[in-house]
Image: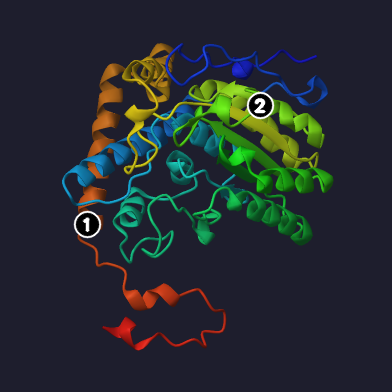
């Protein structure tokens, strides 16, 4: 029997308003379906660290722009970065598809989105590669990068992504589909239908629940009868495990195992990655109504970026000097991306009908030319 990966270590939430004081011990996938997985090499960990840094700097920049009256709707990814970065390391972006959670900025960067493109998406510019400036921020999508379009209603993308996996099967592709959604989305019927279909057809899918303990303002205890969401996997005949989603070194082994299992044709897996959302649900939310500052501050001590940085320093992969240089480089890159995107032209009203009708027979209304 292979040794148990450290990825099964559970997150212990703070005993604070709105959060459970304890969570159950994580359940590992069945032993016969596990292989030992080595941690990524130093260069891979540094790449993941860079994705996470860029995601956090973009996040901070968007909040600043909004306070300055230059930006609009913000959906923060702060606290979720390790999950998307681990998925990026575990997958093959040349063949594998990403169906991202709307907080999966780090994953989208891992699949190839560039900071300029992310900022163009935030500003709603015509250069936005995700939606052409037609949807709010965090509606990810890029056909050329295998990022499945994110819809407003959550979690519709889950069933669509399983459809992509079914198409992969029909086309003879070995591509795996990484499907991420929140703890709130996990309570919706689409998720259960998708899991059942994927399991019946043994599709190459990894389901990842990004559980940050709240669905907007509703705590987990009021949205799920069981706090350990990974136990649901058993009812679909797939392996499932819960993991500290704020520790990349914990998420990666499970992600790698699940991707490899799917690629071998052994069917889907379920990962519950337990994280914490540091910022309000969106820029339209006042999170002080349902959680205390003490709770947020306690979780900030588990910052996934700080934890990976500490590991890289301890292992010698980075020095304080090289870490500072990388952080400055990332800050400059994001600042330049924001300046560039802000100067780009807005999307035009007539573009609202682009990519809507396959034959192009519908003509824009007259007002769209004004």
- Label 2 residue SS: loop
Does residue 327 sit above or below 151 in this rendering?
above
Q: Is residue 214 shown left or right of residue 55?
A: right
Choose the circle earlier in sequence order: 2 or 1.
2
- Decide: few, some or many residues near mark 2? Use Cα within 10 Å; few <14, some 14-19, many ≥20: few
**Residue positioned 52% across, 43% down in the render:** 101
Does residue 244 sit above or below 86 in this rendering?
above
Quadrant of the rendering where the C terminus is positioned: bottom left
Does residue 334 sit above or below 318 in this rendering?
below
Quadrant of the rendering where the N terminus is positioned: top right
| Residue 21: numbered disc | none
Where does label 1 land, which residue? 342
Instruction: Name the foreground residue: 139 vs 219.
Output: 219
Q: Quadrant of residue 5?
A: top right
Instruction: Name the foreground residue: 135 vs 22.
Output: 22
Instruction: Name the foreground residue: 162 vs 72.
Output: 72
Q: Is residue 277 shown left or right of residue 144?
A: left
**Are circles 2 and 1 on residues that touch, CB within 8 Å?**
no
For discs 2 and 1, the disc positioned in front in the rendered view:
2
Residue 165 x %, y %: 70, 52
Q: Quadrant of residue 146?
A: bottom right
Residue 236 x %, y %: 80, 37
**Residue positioned 66% across, 17% down in the render:** 26
**Residue positioned 45% across, 37% down in the render:** 216
Where does label 2 land, which residue? 225
Report the residue that reaches farthest toward the left: 68
- Label 1 residue SS: helix
- Decide: few, some or many residues near mark 1? Use Cα within 10 Å; few <14, some 14-19, many ≥20: some
Q: CA distance from mark 2 to mark 1?
A: 45 Å
Residue 338 x %, y %: 24, 50
Instruction: Name the foreground residue: 148 vs 110.
Output: 148
**Residue positioned 23% across, 32% down in the render:** 328
């Amino acid at each position: 029997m292979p040794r148990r990966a450290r990825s099964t270590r559970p997150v212990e939430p703070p005993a604070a308003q709105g959060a459970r004081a304890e969570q159950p011990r994580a359940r590992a996938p069945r032993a016969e379906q596990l292989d030992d997985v080595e941690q990524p090499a130093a260069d891979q960990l540094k790449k993941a660290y860079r994705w996470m840094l860029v995601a956090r700097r973009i996040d901070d920049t968007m909040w600043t722009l909004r306070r300055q009256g230059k930006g609009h709707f913000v959906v923060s990814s702060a606290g979720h970065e390790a999950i998307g970065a681990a998925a990026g390391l575990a997958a093959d972006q040349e063949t594998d598809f990403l169906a991202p959670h709307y907080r999966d900025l780090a994953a989208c960067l891992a699949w190839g989105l560039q900071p300029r493109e992310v900022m163009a998406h935030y500003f709603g510019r015509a250069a936005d590669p995700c939606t052409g400036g037609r949807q709010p921020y965090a509606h990810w999508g890029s056909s050329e990068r295998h990022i499945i379009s994110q819809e407003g209603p959550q979690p519709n993308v889950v069933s669509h992504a399983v459809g992509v996996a079914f198409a992969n099967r029909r086309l003879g592709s070995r591509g795996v589909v990484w499907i991420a959604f929140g703890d709130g989305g996990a309570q919706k019927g689409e998720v259960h239908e998708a899991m059942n279909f994927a399991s019946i057809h043994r599709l190459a899918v990894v389901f990842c629940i990004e559980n940050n303990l709240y669905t907007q303002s509703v705590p987990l205890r009021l949205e799920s009868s069981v706090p350990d969401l990974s136990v649901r996997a058993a009812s679909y005949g797939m392996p499932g495990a819960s993991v500290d989603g704020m520790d990349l070194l914990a998420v990666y082994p499970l992600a790698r195992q699940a991707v490899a299992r799917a690629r071998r044709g052994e069917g889907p897996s379920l990962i519950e990655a337990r994280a914490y959302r540091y910022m309000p649900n969106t820029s339209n939310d006042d999170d002080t109504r349902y959680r205390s500052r003490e709770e947020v501050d306690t979780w900030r001590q588990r910052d996934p970026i700080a934890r990976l940085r500490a590991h890289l320093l301890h292992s010698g992969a980075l020095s304080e000097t090289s870490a500072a240089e990388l952080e400055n480089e990332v800050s400059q890159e994001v600042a330049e991306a924001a300046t560039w995107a802000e100067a780009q032209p807005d999307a035009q009203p007539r573009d609202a009908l682009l990519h809507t009708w396959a034959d192009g027979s519908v003509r824009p209304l007259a007002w769209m030319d004004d």
